[in-house]
Image (cartoon, rainbow, N blue to C red):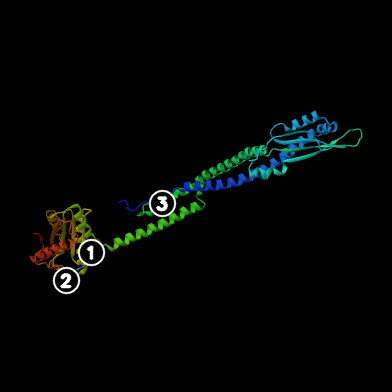
Amino acid sequence: MKSALPVPRRRSLNGKQAILTLLIAGLLSLVAGSIELARDAATMRDEVKNQTDHLLALIDGTAAEAAFQLNPDLARQVADSLFDGDRVAQVALRDDFGRTMASRERDDDASTNWLVTLLFDDILHYRRTLVYEPGQGAPTTQVGEIELTLALDSLGRDFMSRGLLVFSLSVIKALAIAALMVVVFHAFITRPLLRVHAAIVDTDPRRPGEWPKPRLGRHADDELGHLVVSLDRLLKAFQNGLDQRDQLHQISTLDGLTGIANRRRFDGFLPDAWQHSRRSRQPLSLIFIDIDNFKEFNDRYGHVLGDDTLRAVASALSNTVTRATDLVARYGGEEFVCVLADTDMAGARAVADRLREAILELAIPHAGSPHAEFVTASFGVASAYPAEEDEFGFDALLERADAKLYRAKHHGRDRIVWEP
Ligand SMILES: Nc1nc2c(ncn2[C@@H]2O[C@H](COP(=O)(O)OP(=O)(O)OP(=O)(O)O)[C@@H](O)[C@H]2O)c(=O)[nH]1
């Protein structure tokens, strides 16, 4: 029967593991990306300084020549060559008196962000003194200067596009490692764990010792393998406990002398049979059986033979009533009771006839019996169709069967008395 309890929504261990790993990976990739970005910014600063120094070194001779000759055309050519592209915002070439010989300037975008300003503001400006070397041992002369300012917006654009690439690559690397970790963890840890979980879920709680113990292969020697071994021991011990409980329960419901069901078993069985009949709207019958003049038998043949007789009668009764839904029990002393499920009065009388015959067929001598030379028994039969509202009617059925048995005894024994 299915439990009516609400089944809690199961969350996937795999899913949790994947989300957690991705979260950690995301966090790590942010940190790693930022570090990469900082390193790239430092590299870019060095590159920009070196390139600019190199550029200024390249034009240094020509610029000095232009300043020395006070040649504005050459000075313009120098300024133009430096101003090529968008990296330079402003360039000016001055003679030794500070007069501007050539200059170029473009508007720098003022909206450049704070990070770019912070990173590059201190390497934007360059000023070089122009020195003329006449050669042939003549002394060098200072002839002017060249001033150059780099464009912050251009540097910012370059840095942003490089940074985006570096940062994206770092994030992609971290995510790829995380995905690999998810797959590896799933294969090595989560999947075997889930197999243990599935095996426990599939275990029949009534037969825990027969659980489908998972084979974990390469995990046999590690903690997972030990977990399965410990679980196996635990479930087997649990199974032993259940088996012992069942054995004790069986022993406690069996009669020690005859081996058939005892009074305790009968007391539990009758109400259940009654409820079953109520539900299925089937009749239920009861037969009380009492060996006749058994006191006399004991007195004449002794208790040992008396016990043998009780065993033989019990065996005859249980061999006659063989349906799984019926029960033969020793009610007490030399008295037996028989519960017949789904059986009406006619059926119960037929069973009682067969039981009487079975006892007679034993042909156990009973010299002291006033009415027969063999052991006989008296029978009281009662039957009922349990009504839906009659939950405890089995007590009345018991009383009625007992009353019939009393009448059978009263009317000379060795007989079956039934209702009405
Ligand atoms: N050997 C033996 N005798 C038992 C056992 N249990 C009950 N008895 C005997 O069964 C006898 C029952 O005697 P009564 O109740 O007087 O009934 P009865 O002699 O059979 O007479 P009716 O039932 O009226 O025919 C008693 O002598 C009990 O000692 C048992 O386990 N072993």
Disc 3 marks which residue? Answer: 200
Q: Is mark 2 within 8 Å of ligand 1?
A: yes
Mark in the foreground, 2 or 1: 1
**Residue 266 percent location from the top left of the image:** 22, 61
Disc 2 marks which residue? Answer: 299
Task: Give the quarter of the image for residue 269.
Answer: bottom left
Kindly identify the residue that appears in the image at 40 percent across and 56 percent down.
Answer: 236
**Residue 161 percent location from the top left of the image:** 62, 37
Task: Give the quarter of the image for residue 156.
Answer: top right
Q: Is mark 1 within 8 Å of ligand 1?
A: no
Q: Is residue 78 above or below residue 269?
A: above
158 or 182: nearer the viewer: 158
- Give left or right: position of 36 versus 210: right
Residue 381 marker: none
Q: Amino acid at mark 2?
A: Asp
Q: Amino acid at mark 1?
A: Arg
How many angstroms separate mark 1 from mark 3 (CA)? 39 Å
Mark in the foreground, 1 or 3: 3
Mark in the foreground, 3 or 2: 3
- Give left or right: position of 41 versus 75: left
**Residue 304 percent location from the top left of the image:** 22, 68
Q: Is mark 3 within 8 Å of ligand 1?
A: no
- Which SS class for mark 2? helix
Disc 3: CA contacts within 10 A as few (<14), some (14-19) or many (>=20): some
Q: Is residue 296 above or below residue 82?
A: below
Residue found at the very far left of the displayed protein = 411
Dot placed on the residue nearer the N-terminal end, 1 or 3? 3
Q: Is any part of residue 261 visible from this angle?
A: no
Dot placed on the residue nearer the N-terminal end, 3 or 2? 3
Residue 263 marker: 1
How many angstroms separate mark 3 from mark 2 (CA)? 61 Å
